[in-house]
Amino acid sequence: MNLTINEVESALISNDITQKMYINGEWTLSEGNQTRKIINPANSKVIGTVTEGTEVDAKKAITAARKAFYEDGWMNSRARDRAELLLQISNKLEERKEEFAYLDTLNNGKTLRESIADVEDAVNQLRYYAGLATKPHGQTYDVPDDIQAMVVREAIGVVGIIVPWNYPLVMANQKIAAALAAGCTVVVKPAQQTPLSLIRLFEIIDEVGFPSGVVNLVLGAGSKVGAELVANPDVDKISFTGGTDTGIRLMKSAADTVKNISLELGGKSPNIVFADAEFDVAVDYALYAIFANQGQVCSAGSRLLLEESLYDRFVPELVKRAKMIKVGPGWMDGIEMGPLVSEDHMNTVLDYIEIGKNEGATLLCGGNRIVEGEFGKGFFVEPTIFGNTKPDMRIVQEEIFGPVLVIQTFKTEEEAIELANGTDFGLAGAVFSQDGAKAQRVIRGLRAGITWINTYHPTFNEAPWGGYKQSGIGRDLGTYGFEEYLETKQINVNLKVEPSGFFEGK
Ligand code: NAD
């Protein structure tokens, strides 16, 4: 299919039908009869209306997922059949790659080149986990008794998947693919702002023919639908990606049912540049680290840690190039940075810029909403850089989740590590240096789950994704991400079937 952005947009806008949830194999309107308008953040146009789910809808989806797993046989489904279904989804998604990319660009604001990369990633995730579905294997043990002791791996059961708006398709897709491959049933809740690409993914899921109740989609607010998923005793596991504050709330609620929960949370990741770094490479990646996806990336390099002797050469070049970034609607040719996802989120980011100025940091570039002409209808913020910061400033400690970079300086390797680890977060980090041993030493000093040397951002579905400290618990992606959806059962078989003799009387 070769659709243009106008065709996708007009198809969405002319479609005044309320888009539905997918529960127990049926497209469903919410019990509550409420709807939500979905907005294009580049121009504030309404691009769809979706049904607004409630706790009642979440309960229905959980009941369906539980029945599908425990009563209708999905827990004994064949791994090869599950793999085949995932491969079918991946092929259909690949055929409709452009359509899905346009949807994420229209709904989230990200540039088309980033949306296309996301869909390609999603296709690969489905194929990767289709491959892994048939690979779990147990162990046997040589124990000091006439017992055959072994371990088997089993699907954990009903999984509640809750995701944010910054990667609307790919975040949900990676969890759905891993959970289904492992043999779980799922109830998925997208972010309320960005449900469109996921609703379409469920069209494909519907086409390939899963048994009813295995894969469910519930739309709506986190405080209602999401909270129900976490609190409901019939959900066996929660896989969450989102902010740290929300993650803390979810963990407390999950404790009431001792629910298995994995959390992919926020970050304030350091990008450390030593004076001996390849200059052009380091400048280029410093920009990419923070301004990709408008800075709305959990692992963004939002703190640039510069060796002090490099400051006077590096910062003017960085600022010059930041000012050259082409901001505009994500679907237009040549655009390098789109709008923020919503008016609310834009206001949060602008508030942080004011906080930074009030704290005494020096605004080196940007700092404003872009309001000229057509831009005024969208939620565009200039690429923004602050210098002259102090470690205890809020703009240095807190996740802004927008196109705002703060610069810190260091003199020694030890100081670089101390500053890098000096927040509550521990998601990602990078080092730029031509001294390989030094770069490795510093990376080993970082308390963070995702790290790079002489690059920033490349990540792969094959490798585990997740954070230390308040950036989360557990891992997505790779074999580690698959393990999250598996239980471990010990089976002991008596090889000498006779009474134990523990009690004498007969
Ligand atoms: P958020 O925490 O506000 O929302 C995330 C999801 O949780 C949404 O679907 C929301 O509806 C739901 N939710 C909100 N309150 C809830 C509640 N009480 N119970 C259950 N669900 C609830 O986050 P956001 O603003 O959508 O996304 C941005 C955040 O996500 C940033 O902090 C970012 O760093 C983080 N993030 C982390 C990763 C990672 O892999 N570590 C990836 C992407 C985004």
Image (spheres, grey):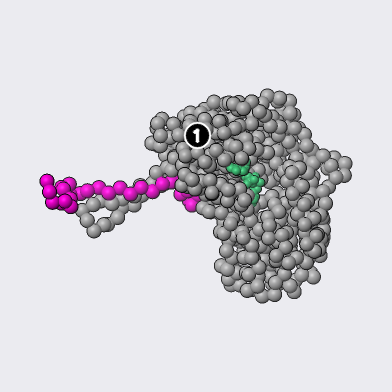
Position of 340 with respect to 428 (left or right) is right
Residue placed under numbered mark 1 in the picture: 62
Q: Depth check: give the residue in front, 450 or 204.
A: 450
Q: Which quadrant of the figure contains the N terminus?
A: top right
Q: Depth check: give the residue in front, 182 or 342.
A: 342
Residue at 54%, 26% in the rendered image: 26
Residue at 71%, 56% in the rendered image: 290
Position of residue 393 measured from the top left corner of the image (x, y, whole percent): 72, 63
Note whether residue 268 is visible.
Answer: yes
| Secondary structure under the numbered disc 1 in the rendered image | helix
Q: Depth check: give the residue in front, 307 or 221.
A: 221
Position of 287 with respect to 177 (left or right) is right
Q: Amino acid at mark 1?
A: Ile
Position of residue 96 measured from the top left corner of the image (x, y, whole percent): 63, 34
Residue at 61%, 48% in the rendered image: 246
Position of residue 331 measured from the top left corner of the image (x, y, whole percent): 75, 40
Position of residue 442 measured from the top left corner of the image (x, y, whole percent): 60, 69
Note whether residue 77 is visible.
Answer: no
Q: Which residues are magenta?
A: 479-506
Label 1 CA crowd tier, 10 Å (few <14, some 14–19, many 20+)? many
Asked if residue 491 is among those painted magenta in the image, a careful observer would answer: yes
Position of 411 with respect to 67 (left or right) is right
